[in-house]
Image (tube, rainbow, N blue to C red):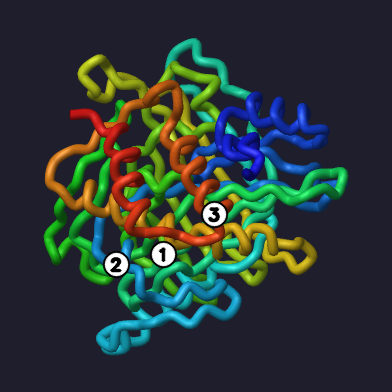
Amino acid sequence: MTDRRYVNLALTVAAAVALLIAAGVAVNAHACEVCGCQDTGAKADAAKTAPATADAPAKGHDHAHGHDHDHGHAHGAHTHTHAKAAAHGEKFQRDRQAILAMAGEYRVDFQFQETVAVEPGYELKEPYHSGATEFVEVIEDTGEFISLQHVLVLHPEDGGEAHVVKHWRQDWRYEDTQLTAFRGNRTWERVELAPEQVEGKWTQAVFQVDDSPRYEGIGKWTHTGGRSAWESNQTWRPLPRREFSKRDDYQVLVARNRHTITPQGWVHEQDNYKLVLDDAGRPKNVLAHESGLNVYDKVDDVDFAAGRMYWDATDEYWQDVRAVWADLLDDPGRVSLRAKVDGDRLHQVMFALADDVKEAGAYDAEAMRPVIRQRIESFVTE
């Protein structure tokens, strides 16, 4: 069986580091931002790689869980596109090109800094800085819907076997009228928009490492003066895990996102503030403002083979995981999740099942689908 010590790389930094040190692996600990997970990365000056970060919730739409599409790698994927996509015009095609340009192999740099203390007596926290390496894969492209999966690849300093963690996912949908909004207290709600509210716009739904939802925003891509960028509305999201394991003084990170395509790759900027909720889940007060800058620079000197082997071995499993979440999030009303079931967090349970699939060498969909649904639904509160 695969060494399960590495299933929990998305846990707290302390836990991840302890596991790797116990195995004799020298690493630097990093908490990633976009998905909010905790990861562990090799020192840049030794291995010139590290684990990556990114943020992403899911939504329950039909495209997200089909089983008959191509799953080629991002650097040469053959994707199928609805014929009607071509009818949207040049602006739509440029939007698509910008989204697809985020696929590739990257070294990522993450910086976050609290900038303004709003709460009386609040002291700004130390800036956060970490790095990682990951690849971003186009796992589905149907024209008006594009799904990008991030996968971390960790190379230990001693040159040992690379360690892989499935990371966050971002789903882009054109003129989407159904969004998933975070409401605090591990609760998400479906929100319906009118067609006139979404005209010419794309939603970006971000999902956690276990494919549970994180947040979703909507905005327009603009292409001016050689600059392609997308800016979101203001969204609520759960605490990033760089702070989740260390802080309990606020409940919601309120954010606006900007994604900009660059000659070297792309950049994700965040304008955040940290919101305290009252016992009823209503906004109470703001602690501080925060700025975030995540820079994705393309690389050609990092070996991502281990990550691609993992994804090829578990792709069908994760398709079925996404299908369950699609069903849950398509239902009207709210979805609330338990923090733990039988002492385990959701990502631990789902990663362990993925590990079993990888070790088996083949995927038995008929046997696994009811297991996947049961495990996920056990975390859903009534």
Task: Residue 112: tell me if it is visible.
Answer: no
Q: Is residue 319 left or right of residue 156?
A: left
First in sequence: mark 3 vs mark 1: 1
**333 lies above or below 21:** below
Which label lies toward us, 3 or 1?
A: 3
Residue that mark 3 sits on: 360
Q: In which quarter of the image is the N terminus?
A: top right
Left-right relation of 94 to 3 = left
**Place of residue 261 in the rendered image (x, y in percent of width and height, measured from the top left):** 55, 67
Q: Do the residues labelled 2 and 1 touch (CB within 8 Å)?
A: yes
Check if mark 2's residue and mark 3's residue have beta carbons within 8 Å: no
In the rendered image, which residue does mark 2 sit on?
Answer: 63
Residue type at mark 2 is His
Indicate which disc, 2 or 1, sits on the residue closer to the N terminus: 2
State the quadrant of the C terminus. top left
Mark 1 surroundings within 10 Å by alpha-carbon count, few (fewer than 14), some (14 through 19), many (20 or more): many
**Of marks 2 and 3, which one's residue comes earlier in the chain?**
2
Kindly report which numbered mark, 2 or 1, lies closer to the viewer in this rendering.
Answer: 2
C-alpha separation, residue under disc 3 versus residue under disc 1: 27 Å
Q: Quick one: SS at disc 1?
A: strand
What residue is pinned by disc 1?
Answer: 147
Circle 3: element type = helix
Real-space CA distance between mark 2 and mark 3, rounded to the nearest whole angstrom:
28 Å
Residue 279 position, x and y percent, is: 25, 15
Quadrant of res 246 = top right
Q: Camera-side residue: 281 or 47?
A: 47
Helix, strand or loop under label 2: helix
Percent from the top left, x then y, of residue 189?
Answer: 21, 41
Q: Which residue is drawn at 43% across and 62% down?
A: 316
